[in-house]
Image (cartoon, grey):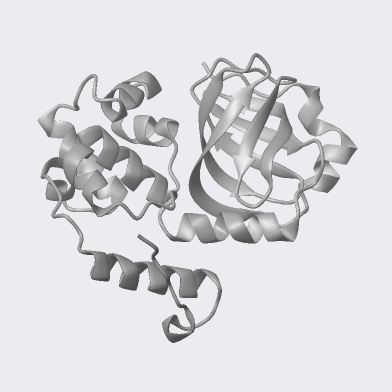
Amino acid sequence: MATMANPLSHDQAASSKRRHTRRSLPLFVQGRQNSGATLEIQIFNISETGVLVECEADLAAGDSIQLDLPHAGMVRARIVWTSGSVLGCQFDTPVSAATLSAAQLQSAVGGHLNLDTNDNASTDHFGARLQRLRIRKGLSQMDIAAHLGVSAPSISGWEKGRTRPKHARLDALAELLGVAQSELTEEPEPEGIQELVERSRDLIARAMSTTPDKVHITVEL
């Protein structure tokens, strides 16, 4: 059963801050709890004053976490409401417009700035592809679970490679993610460096509202 917000999320200050424009961007970042334990955090949207994330750690309203944001580094935020693994957080100090732009840019080029073309070919599996496609669609594990009629921990198990969905659910899962079932179940073809650079140039241009010919990428080996 979902645990909803305590009154922290309903005060006037929080309501005022929610009026800041939020940028939707599926993005994975590292984080930390106050205890020092590391966190894997998926960001769904972000504004100068707050962020909506998903994280599997056992956290509650009133707890604080740190998120490693592009451009800004570690930023502390207070959890103001929870719904399962989805957390609504308020930054202790508003982040800059440059940080928001950097997060949007990193999201546009795939959630992680990783140009190692051999990485997916050697380690990619069903769970990793499911996680990547889910993030690209901006869906939480709870969204997937509700659509398929399973529990959120089941989706977590699929993504971590502990279990796989029954064949009967693959069609519905692929339809929800907007891909062919083969994209979930078959090994991907490795992407060449030139194709990767061209795709990255197009994504960066789209994120920055410019044209690909104005984007220059230099790779130092």
Q: Position of residue 71 (x, y in %)?
A: 65, 52
Query: Residue at point 28% right, 37% down?
Result: 128
Q: Is residue 79 above or below residue 214?
A: above
In depth, the one of 68 and 89 nearer the eye is: 68
Q: Is residue 129 above or below residue 197?
A: above
Q: Position of residue 190 (x, y in %)?
A: 16, 55
Mark yes or no: residue 196 visible: yes
Query: Residue at point 77% right, 31% down?
Result: 9
Q: Position of residue 47 (x, y in %)?
A: 70, 51
Q: Is residue 120 left or right of residue 31?
A: left
Mark yes or no: residue 150 visible: no
Query: Residue at point 58% right, 54% down?
Result: 103
- Image quadrant assignment for residue 186: top left
Most extreme residue toward the front, as rendered? 221
Q: Is residue 212 left or right of residue 178?
A: right
Figure label count: 0
Q: Is residue 109 above or below residue 161?
A: below
Q: Is residue 134 left or right of residue 96?
A: left
Q: Position of residue 184 (x, y in %)?
A: 18, 43
Query: Residue at point 48% right, 22% down?
Result: 56
Quadrant including the C terminus: bottom left
Q: Is residue 201 left or right of residue 183?
A: right
Most extreme residue toward the right, as rendered? 12
- Image quadrant assignment for residue 216: bottom left
